[in-house]
Image: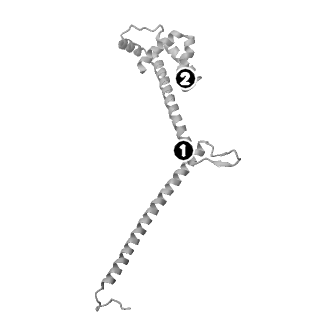
Amino acid sequence: MYRNFGPNRRPLTAREKSIRFQYGALFVFSALCAITLGVLYNNQNTELKKIEGIKQRIDSAFIKLDYIESFVDDDGDTVEVSTEKKIDQMVDDAFRYREMHDDLFELRSTDARYEMALEYYADPLVHQEYRDRTGTSFKSKYTEAQRKEIVEKIKKEVSSFNSIIAYRDAFDWYREIDPVAIKEIELFLYFTE
């Protein structure tokens, strides 16, 4: 076979050029395919690792939240709960928690208003401010010392009630003892709005 190397080389024939171009194009095409497949494989491998990490976190959260991981079906076989069902169950519980959280927040806010009204009731300056704001001639039926005593009695009993609505329950408890004092204290809820 004749080699076309060295100083005495002859020009390539049309057929040789065609063959060289075809093999060159095939080499470039195969190189591009290899690079593309390598990048796709790497991306797919990265995505797979990320998905496996997420699945492990879901399984870990599922165990920590004391959900049932497997159950026995009608045939007596143990069936694992699928990841989709795990996610659905946790999402449903999260929605329920959000609704409960909003309700709890509202209850605690209301209870904080009762607590503030109790503090305002003991303060004589707030009594004057109440008269100024409402334009009424409100005068408590109790002296300042009696009001402080009432507030102390109510605060002492707060710890015996539900912590979420303790002040509201303490108001209801004291309403049976002295409804007039509670009626006066509830006037100061005006300042907590």
The Cα atoms of the two marked residues, 2 and 1, are separated by 36 Å
Q: Residues within 10 Å of mark 2 (few under 14, many from 20)?
A: many
Total marks in image: 2
- The answer to whether the residues at label 2 and label 1 have Cβ atoms under 8 Å apart is no
Name the secondary structure under disc 2. Answer: helix
Give the image location of residue 5, x and y in percent.
33, 89
Disc 1 residue type? Ile
Vertical relation: 84 (above or below) 157: below
Left or right of residue 18, residue 107 in this image: right
- Vertical position of residue 18 compared to residue 39: above or below: below
> How far across and how far down the image is residue 105, in percent?
49, 29
> Residue 104 got which mark?
none
Taking the spot 48% from the left edge, 27% from the top edge, the residue there is 106
SS of the residue under disc 1: helix
Q: Position of residue 53 (x, y in %)?
A: 52, 53
83 versus 44 height, above or below: above
Image quadrant in which you'd find residue 174: top right
Residue 152 vs residue 74: left or right?
Answer: left
Residue 154 sits in quarter: top right
- Quarter of the picture containing the C terminus is top left
Q: Is residue 114 left or right of residue 80?
A: left
Categorize mark 1 by other alpha carbons within 10 Å: few (<14), some (14-19), many (20+): some
> Which residue is tagged 2?
166
| Residue type pointed to by label 2 | Ala
Q: Which residue is mark 1?
A: 87
Looking at the picture, tell me which residue is in the foreground, 165 or 86: 86
